[in-house]
Amino acid sequence: MRFQFKTSYNDDINIFKNRYHVFWYALLGAGLFALPFVLGDYYVAQAIFILIFAIAGVGLMMLVGHTGLVSLGHAAFLAVGAYTTINLEKLGVPFLIALPLAGIFTGLFGAFIAIPVLRLIGIYLAIATMALSIIIEDIIVMAGPITGGVQGLSVDSIKLLGDWVSSDIFTVDLYASPYKFYFLCLFVAVLVTLLTINLLRSSTGRAFHAIRDSEVSARAMGINVARYKTLSFGISCFITGLAGGLLAHYLGHINHEAFLILTSIELLMILVIGGMGSVHGAFFGAFVFGMLPLTVTVLIETFGAPLGINSATFPGLSTGIFAAILVGFILFEPYGVNGMWLKIRTYFALFPLYRKDMFKRQKTYLKTERMR
């Protein structure tokens, strides 16, 4: 059993709690750095997909997990980030500038949308964001000069420095140089994670958590709820816009079908399975979401072949299994994969003093909130 004796307030907000955390995260970083050198191109592409959706999951987690606001329309902000990035690149803007600009534009767009939308709460907010996603789909189809209409847009290779430097070293292509694409996505994921963790350690992050736990109590403490809700929505859309720009280059060709309402639901499912209210949960959920179809396919081809069962016979099997896993987590492990990891870690840290009811679910709202 290991204890940490805290002597200052910084001990509670430090990114790394102790030297053991530094060691394990350094080991994780080394493993992620070495991954493209030990895996084939197919699995590197799968890792890129996981990183992109992990970035989008961190963005949605800022809104849903840390501020307590429900969104079923974040696919719309993926689309805004994707089309903004592509159009800026077509104007000659280097990718290293186009991607942050697309994120900023998406964040401002989200903050503007949040002003009227965040007057709603609960299921009404979810319906409003879902309606926004549907509207964005129609706009993509109608705005042909910008989005390519129904046919969509073909996406060229990433030129990190644009036409300023034509060297192949600064050109990133998923098929020609998947390892470059992987490191680019890994770099963005690390930056987004550090941004999120540091934001949550600040007074702004504590305001988000106060609003999530009890909006009435947050108002009583003097927190400007409308301002922080709008700020949370804007930051969430900013991060999602970055993921959208990367996703456009990953897909190679984008149209409205890449940003359907189903994508928004999948992002929310990632958070539920990974663990709501945790940055780690976004990565755990993205890993499950990215690896599940591959795992199901391998299992079907391995064990289903003698029975005459294959992927073509049951094309929606992976989706059904994913839905069953989601229901299972909601019923038996509401804290998701991250909650399972916390329980396992706590069990070994406190053994033999660990108790099953240490992680008992508790209500996080006040009775006064029922009077709305």
Image (cartoon, helix red, strand yellow):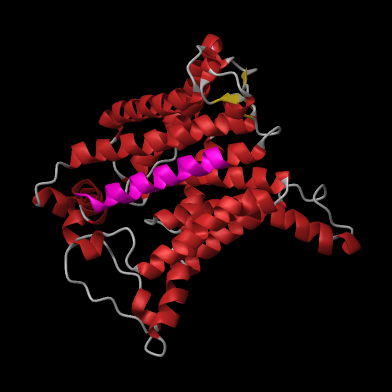
Q: Residue at x 36, y 52 (%)?
A: 65
Q: Residue at x 54, y 14 (%)?
A: 90
Q: Report the residue that reaches farthest toward the top.
A: 145
Q: Could you tell me residue 168's position as x and y percent?
A: 63, 25
Q: Residue at x 51, y 59 (%)?
A: 28
Q: Position of 69 compared to 296: left or right?
A: left
Q: Could you tell me residue 264's position as x and y percent?
A: 50, 40
Q: Position of 175 compared to 22: left or right?
A: right
In this rendering, the count of numbered labels is: 0
Q: Is residue 110 magenta?
A: no
Q: Could you tell me residue 211's position as x and y percent?
A: 23, 50
Q: Position of 300 compared to 73: left or right?
A: right
Q: Could you tell me residue 134's position as x and y percent?
A: 49, 28
Q: Is residue 201 magenta?
A: yes
Image height check: is 235 above or below 135? below
Closer-to-camera residue (356/118): 356
The majority secondary structure of the magenta stretch comes to helix
Instruction: Identify the magenta region.
Output: 183-202
Closer-to-camera residue (21/245): 21
Q: Quadrant of residue 252?
A: top right
